[in-house]
Structure formats: structure tokens, C-alpha cells
Image: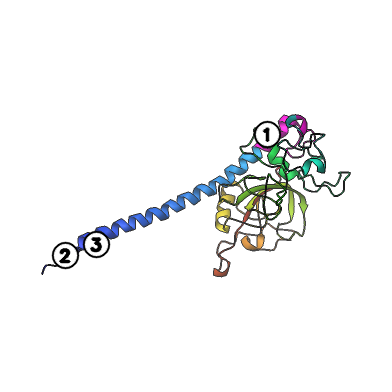
């Protein structure tokens, strides 16, 4: 009885095809990741440009501008300032900042000592209303369940809702903070930061505590646009002990390098790019 079987030539062809398919999938994944990494600096440049354009046009920082309600309406139907505006959850207008030249969270000069400006959220609302960035943003902290603009179980930042989403991942988000000059910080190197723009994982609070990049990926970005070091230049790293090989609180952070040769137990570490001294 005659038995049918594949010849060696046919098996070889199948193996070659499988190899090409596997290589194509892996190559495609590498290309996708490379595009995502390029997007990090592209997004930073877009937002930095938008912020400086806003400042030139309105003579104030977005988020901090004290007369934003005169341009885009007051969420509280009044002067656009204070908790009656910031905590309004259903209106679609905006609120104004305090005009102190800093995009901040807690408002130390507000007559209501318990008041928060939420300027770090208003900034994205103002930029969008000025037509300088795409999207619609709530302009306030996310709460649950009262806030119908951004609803989440934990108060804070939600990608695509009150802060921009990054193309690096569906949970990637951009945030801004005013830190001034830091010394002895728990997860940021010593030095001048002033206003810093950073990309991290969300949702969460407005602190750079959840990363999405490996040390090698951030080193690659840093080398292309800055000095290739985690603690110097305008692009630095947060969560330093996951990404850099030296101490965070040091008078001379320059010798730090990216932790490129990770041990097996540290392979899951992720880094946060921090673009400092924005303005």
C-alpha cells in the first residue's frame, strides 16, 4: 500500500515560510515599539511648543492665567475662580488660575486655605480651548462618582480625560508640575526643575511614580535629544533607583549612568522621562 508523506523539499519550504512569518512578526513589533519611542519626544515638543505659544499670545501661562474665564466662560457662572468653579462637575466652561507664574496644585495665596487651583489640570483645558492641542479635558481632578467629567475609583489623573494620553501605551499620560529646585527628594535627582513635563503610567496622582520605559529605551531617547545621562541636562529620569546606578541625593549627580545591564530580578523596572526647566 502506497503511503503519502511530505518530501524534504516540501518540509524545507514550510520551515522557511514559518521562519519568515516569525521574523516578520518580531520585526513588526520592533517597528511598532520604535515608533512609540519616537512619539515620546514628539509629544513633548508638541506640548512644550503649545505652552510657549499660549504664553506669547495670552501673556500668561496656561492653567495659571487669571482671566481664562473671560475668554472661554466661567464654569461657576461667576468670576471663574475659587472652589465653586473648580469643584463644579457638570459645566463645560473653564476656571482661571491665580496668575502667580506657576502651574501648581495647592494654591497658597487663595483666601480659602483649603482651596486647590488644579492648575496642573486646567493647563490642558486652556491649551485645548485655545486650539493649541487636540482633545477635550476636564480641567479638574478626577473623582468618583460625583465628577461626571472624569470618573474613576481613585482621585487623580486619567489619560485622555483630564491629562493627555501618550501613544507609548493606552495608560500613558503627560503631566506637568512645578518643583522649583529639589534637594533630597525620594525619587528625583537634586537640581533645578522649575516647571517639569513628564510621561508616566496612569491613572494615578500627579506624581511621576509609574513608568513605561526600560532604562535602555530612555537612554536611547536621552542620547538622541540631550546628553544621554539620567541626572543631568534637560531630560532626566524619575524613579532613579529603577533606572540609574547612583544615589539620587548627591551634590554631583553627573557621574550617574543609565542602568543598562539589568540583573534578572530587575528586568521589570521601568523609567519615567522628566523634561525639566520648561519655563
With respect to residue 13, does 196 lie above or below? above
Secondary structure category for the residue under label 1: helix
With respect to residue 263, does 274 lie above or below? above
Q: Taking the image as drawn, is residue 218 in sight?
A: yes
For the point 68% across and 41% down, the residue is 124
Question: Which is nearer the N-term, disc 2 or disc 1?
Answer: 2
- The CA distance from mark 1 to mark 3 is 62 Å
In magenta segment, residue 266: no
Give how far across and how far down residue 8 sits, in percent.
20, 63
In magenta segment, residue 67: yes
**In front: mark 1 or mark 3?**
1
Secondary structure category for the residue under label 3: helix
Does residue 221 appear to the left or right of 107 in the view shown? left
Mark 3, residue position: 11
Give how far across and how far down residue 10 sits, in percent.
22, 59
Mark 1, residue position: 129
Question: Which is nearer the N-term, disc 3 or disc 2?
Answer: 2
Instruction: Tell me if label 2 and label 1 are in contact, CB under 8 Å.
Output: no
Looking at the rendered image, the quarter that the C terminus falls into is top right
Secondary structure category for the residue under label 2: loop
Q: Which residues are magenta?
A: 50-70
How busy is the neighbourhood of tag 3: few (under 14 within 10 Å), some, or many (20 plus)?
few
Amino acid at each position: 500500500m502506497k503511503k503519502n508523506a511530505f518530501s524534504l523539499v516540501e518540509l524545507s519550504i514550510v520551515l522557511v515560510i514559518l521562519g519568515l512569518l516569525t521574523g516578520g512578526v518580531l520585526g513588526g513589533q520592533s517597528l511598532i515599539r520604535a515608533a512609540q519611542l519616537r512619539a515620546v519626544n514628539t509629544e513633548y515638543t508638541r506640548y512644550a511648543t503649545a505652552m510657549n505659544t499660549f504664553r506669547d499670545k495670552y501673556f500668561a501661562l496656561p492653567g495659571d492665567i487669571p482671566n481664562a474665564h473671560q475668554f472661554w466662560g466661567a464654569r461657576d457662572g461667576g468670576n471663574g475662580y475659587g472652589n465653586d468653579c473648580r469643584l463644579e462637575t457638570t459645566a463645560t466652561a473653564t476656571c482661571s488660575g491665580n496668575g502667580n507664574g506657576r502651574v501648581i496644585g495647592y494654591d497658597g495665596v487663595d483666601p480659602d486655605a483649603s482651596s486647590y487651583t488644579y492648575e496642573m489640570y486646567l493647563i490642558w483645558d486652556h491649551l485645548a480651548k485655545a486650539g493649541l492641542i487636540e482633545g477635550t479635558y476636564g480641567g479638574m481632578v478626577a473623582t468618583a462618582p460625583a465628577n461626571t467629567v472624569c470618573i474613576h475609583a481613585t482621585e487623580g489623573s486619567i489619560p485622555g480625560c483630564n491629562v493627555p494620553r501618550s501613544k507609548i501605551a493606552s495608560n500613558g499620560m503627560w503631566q506637568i508640575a512645578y518643583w522649583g529646585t529639589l534637594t533630597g527628594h525620594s525619587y528625583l535627582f537634586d537640581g533645578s526643575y522649575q516647571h517639569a513635563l513628564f510621561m508616566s503610567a496612569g491613572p494615578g496622582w500627579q506624581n511621576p511614580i509609574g513608568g513605561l520605559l526600560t532604562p535602555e529605551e530612555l537612554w536611547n531617547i536621552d542620547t538622541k535629544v540631550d546628553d544621554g545621562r539620567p541626572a543631568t541636562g534637560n531630560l532626566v529620569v524619575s524613579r532613579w533607583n529603577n533606572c540609574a546606578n547612583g544615589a539620587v541625593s548627591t551634590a554631583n549627580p553627573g557621574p550617574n549612568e543609565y542602568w543598562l545591564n539589568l540583573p534578572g530580578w530587575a528586568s521589570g523596572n521601568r523609567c519615567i522621562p522628566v523634561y525639566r526647566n520648561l519655563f
